[in-house]
Image (cartoon, rainbow, N blue to C red):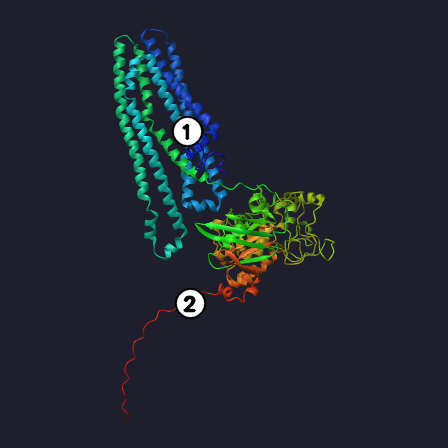
Amino acid sequence: MDHGSGEAAGPGSATATAGDPARVLLLGLLRRGTGRSAVLLLTVLTGTACALLLPAALARAVDAALTGGSTSHLVPFLLLLLVGTAADALAQFADPWATTHATADLSRRLITRIIGLGTRATARFQPGDLVTRLVAGTAEAALAPAAVIHTGAELLCSTGALIALALIDPWSAAALLLGAPLGAAAVRRFLRQVAHGATAYLTAQAALAERLVEALGGLRTIRAGGLRDAEAARVLTPLPELNRAGRAIWQSQRQVQWRTSLLAPALQVAVLAVAGQGAAAGRITPGEVLAVLAYSTTALGLLSAAQSLLALARARAGAARTAEVLAVPAPAPGTRPLPPGPGELLLDAVTVRRGGRTVLDRLTLRVPAGATVALVGRSGSGKSTVAALAGGLTEPDEGRVTLDGIPLPEARPADLRRAVGYAFARPVLLGTTIADAVAYTDPVDRGPGGPGRQASAETFVDRLPTDPHSPHLGRPGAAGPDVSGSSASGPDPDAPVPGSIRRALQQPPAEALIDRTPLGPAGPRLDRRRARPGTDDQDSNGPSTGKRSTNEPHVNAPAPDATVPAPVPDPVRWALRQASAEAFVDRLPAGPHTPLADAPLSGGERQRLGLARAIAHGGRLTVLDDATSSLDTATEAEVTRALADALRGRTRLLVAHRATAAAGADLVAWLDAGRVRALAPHRELWSDPAYRALFAPPPPQPAPTVEAPAPAAAHPVDAP
């Protein structure tokens, strides 16, 4: 079981340390930041050593001055003062350096775990709670390395000062120890109160964030209902608890401060009185009296170390909340390579339970390779759950899901993600620009140099319907001459590709191919927006003459101005066209280069970009989870026709709510009560009234009956 690199144990661990995930996490932070913590520790220890030696050096210098001795005793004092000041100055820089790096490291681990858990994380923790754990909890926990070092140094300094005081005058040390139990009790109570207050503060902060995230997601509903003030009051409901927790921390700090501020001077007066009596009796020298005063102040410094103790308590509270997420078990990633295959999907007796309810009950469904299967059923029948299972976004509680015979949990994550593409009803567009969003899940376009820079010819060929054996060249799904030289029966898609051909496809990378074109990556041949018929620059809608344009710049022509945006990669442009998104994208201020933040998109436009992302992604299986629900009927028909061509050769699993979508599928899986009620073509199921009822509009609500007034009594009319 994965517990976040072994640094956050879950409940039920056998050892004592594993039973306290917060402590394990704090110790892990110290280990992971050994270098930075060592620098901080070195500077703090140097300052501590100087602080312990300085009073003794001062005593010798004062005694030498009073007895008329050499002034050379002043040199060690000045040297210690200089080194101690430098060490304290360096510690001021090393402290935030260690803390910020610890925050970054812990935040990276937490966000990686949250994303790795996927729906498991949001099922157990609310999004707002996760945000506060990531933003506030990690920052609090990251205080631990510096807080531990400072608290340990203060304890060491106080202990060393007490020992030095005992060596100079045991009676003065005894006087100081009289108040130690009172000081220790005050500090212990402070730590207990602050730890409780810090936990309550972070919990209330998380509740506030949860409500705020909910409100931001429902702004239209709030505005439509005129609920601004009511919703603001609901969001701020945890504010009193947040106030109480903050005041409790402040109150605890105030109490320990005034108690120690009274205790410390009283003990110093007692120590000074004993030391003065010793000087009068000749037991200690005047210089040693100054050393006794300095050492007593240093020894009492632990009582005023409230700031370090407060940071330690806050770090423990933050670590407890962070460790709670890291302790959630994540499934171990698969290690089996996913071999080439046609894309046959099998859900074998899968059962899924959510919130105590059985969503899928021993469901079995086989999706043939290259076929389109539509999932239909009433709300709650498990359609989206099946869609999530198909690509390994979630795992069944029982049963198994395989792709081309390989169980999804056993497949390597990178192979699985390349093999399966998704389009969702409410796609979240990630990236900087529109083009980035479309290419976001495309492994070809995720290289450090931008889209296409790390892609070899092998990647593009593997996107073709039958991999390297495809008889059609050009864009996926485009018709073209048969250049395979095969018989009419077609090539064997399962035949192995000769190693020499595979190696040739792997070299050279796309970057080198692009750089050989006129003007390199900025060449006009890569940007087909302004293509004209009869040139090499036209798109797939018209035939190419195969002739080189006479206006084409020479290959050695100088590159254009670097401020011109790089052309959109052809697979992205093609995907936009197939998803009927090219037209509205080109109307944006910068076309595909328009930043997402500056692109006003409707729900249907977002869905089309989500479909373009799935098309550009490639893979052998494409899952469309209600991906056209926001499109009007005409646009949906247009997109459906384009998808049939763009996704030709891929296995498709789609969640359908319209009869037209179900009719376009090869098979329809009718889900009912978590099982497959029927699996057949749409035309065969249409004869069943219960099946037709799935697509029927809801019956109109009867209008409220209003009792008509009784007609007025008729009065006879006299004949003329």
Q: Quadrant of residue 258?
A: top left
Say if residue 451 shows up in the picture: no
Residue 512 spot, x, y in % from top left: 65, 43
- Classify 10 Å Cα crowding around label 2: few (below 14), some (14-19), many (20 and above): few
Provide the secondary structure element on which disc 1 rests: helix
Q: Quadrant of the C terminus?
A: bottom left
Residue 2 spot, x, y in % from top left: 50, 38
Provide the secondary structure element on which disc 2 rests: loop
Residue 325 spot, x, y in % from top left: 44, 40
- Mark 2 vs mark 1, CA separation in Å: 67 Å
Residue receiving disc 1:
146
Of 31 and 279, nearer the camera is 31
Residue receiving disc 2:
700
Residue 542 left/right relative to 602: right
Indicate whether 180 appears above or below 591. above
Residue 558 - label: none
Of 632 and 238, nearer the camera is 238
- CB under 8 Å between discs 2 and 1: no
Q: Quadrant of residue 144?
A: top left
Of 716 and 543, nearer the camera is 716
Name which of mark 2 and mark 1 comes first in the sequence: 1
Residue 483 spot, x, y in % from top left: 72, 54
Residue most extreme to the top: 68
Q: Amino acid at mark 2?
A: Pro
Say if residue 662 shows up in the picture: yes
- Classify 10 Å Cα crowding around label 1: few (below 14), some (14-19), many (20 and above): many
Tally of numbered tags: 2
Indicate whether 706 appears above or below 81. below
Residue 264 left/right relative to 94: left
Q: Amino acid at mark 1?
A: Ala
Q: Which is closer to the viewer, label 2 or label 1?
A: 2
